[in-house]
Amino acid sequence: MPDQAHSLEEISRQARRHVESLRGAGIEWLPKAPPVPPLASLPSDPSVEAHGGDDMAQRRTALEVLAEKVSTCSRCPELVATRTQTVFGVGPIEPDLCFIGEAPGADEDKQGEPFVGAAGQLLNRIIAACGMKREDVYICNIIKCRPPGNRTPLINEVENCREYLDAQLDLIKPKFICALGATAAQNLLGTTQALGKLRGRFHDYKGMTVIVTYHPAYLLPHRSPEKKKDVWEDMKMLLARMGRPIPMTGGK
């Protein structure tokens, strides 16, 4: 059966890539999965996923192991010397949507959670305008430490943190990603194109659909609040692709 053989080969390749990504991020151990039962003992109802809960539990454990690894990372001496703590990410496994920002700020460095300052409050309103709740989505940043003075992350800092980000995304498996701002978008997608060129269309990152929009910090009153309407256009485009209704009150 060539189709079945091809499918098994693809599964094997995906499994190897997954293990290599985790090993590169420093994860050397995962809880052992229970033995797979024979086909005859699997539930006859196709809506029941065998061992789905076990897989989710293993991935959440692996995510916790990765977060612990990140918390002791010392690859960027300047960031290690100035951070209060690392800021890993928050949200569920397998969310419909993951927001990726640039880097933690002062509030995030203090609290250990991404997007909790003024930009985070605006992001919460954007999420609500889309008909979702913050706890429904996953939120993280390209790098996990606050750069001094909230400067833009340096190339080597992004490179040092990249395997953590890739392992994180490999474990949470979001269906869609919204890259917030040029730094997040360019580093995620590996491009030097300007934000204006990246907006208004979808991109692919390892099978995940990516949309690019402005960072919430750019929309704050002292910067460019008029760009909120552009963000709402991006969100409507994303919601349509996700097959979700577009709330009439959004974007105001």
Image (cartoon, rainbow, N blue to C red):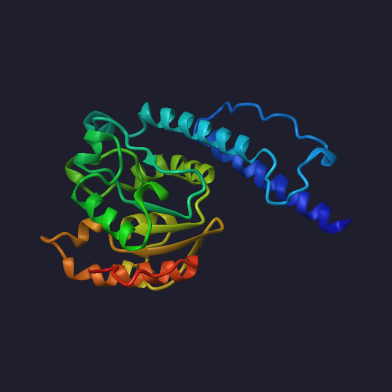
Image location of residue 8, percent across then percent down: 77, 49
Task: Kindly identify the residue that appears in the image at 33 percent across and 51 percent down.
Answer: 101
Task: Pick out the residue farthest to the left.
Answer: 222
Q: Is residue 114 left or right of residue 57?
A: left
Residue 36 seen in the figure: yes
Image location of residue 56, percent across then percent down: 57, 38
Task: Assign the C terminus to one quadrant of the image.
Answer: bottom left
Residue 181 seen in the figure: no
Image location of residue 42, percent across then percent down: 78, 41
Q: Is residue 114 left or right of residue 68?
A: left
Foreground of the two, 247 or 177: 247
Task: Kindly identify the residue that appears in the image at 43 percent across and 44 percent down.
Answer: 162
Task: Kindly identify the residue that appears in the image at 78 percent across and 47 percent down.
Answer: 44
- Determine whether 171 is above or below 58 in the image: below
Task: Kindly identify the residue that appears in the image at 21 percent across and 60 percent down.
Answer: 218
Foreground of the two, 50 or 171: 50
Task: Pick out the residue farthest to the right.
Answer: 1
Image location of residue 145, percent across then percent down: 30, 38
- Quarter of the image for residue 201 reads bottom left
Q: How many marks?
A: 0
Task: Assign the N terminus to one quadrant of the image.
Answer: bottom right
- Determine whether 242 is above or below 158 in the image: below
Q: Is residue 8 left or right of residue 106?
A: right
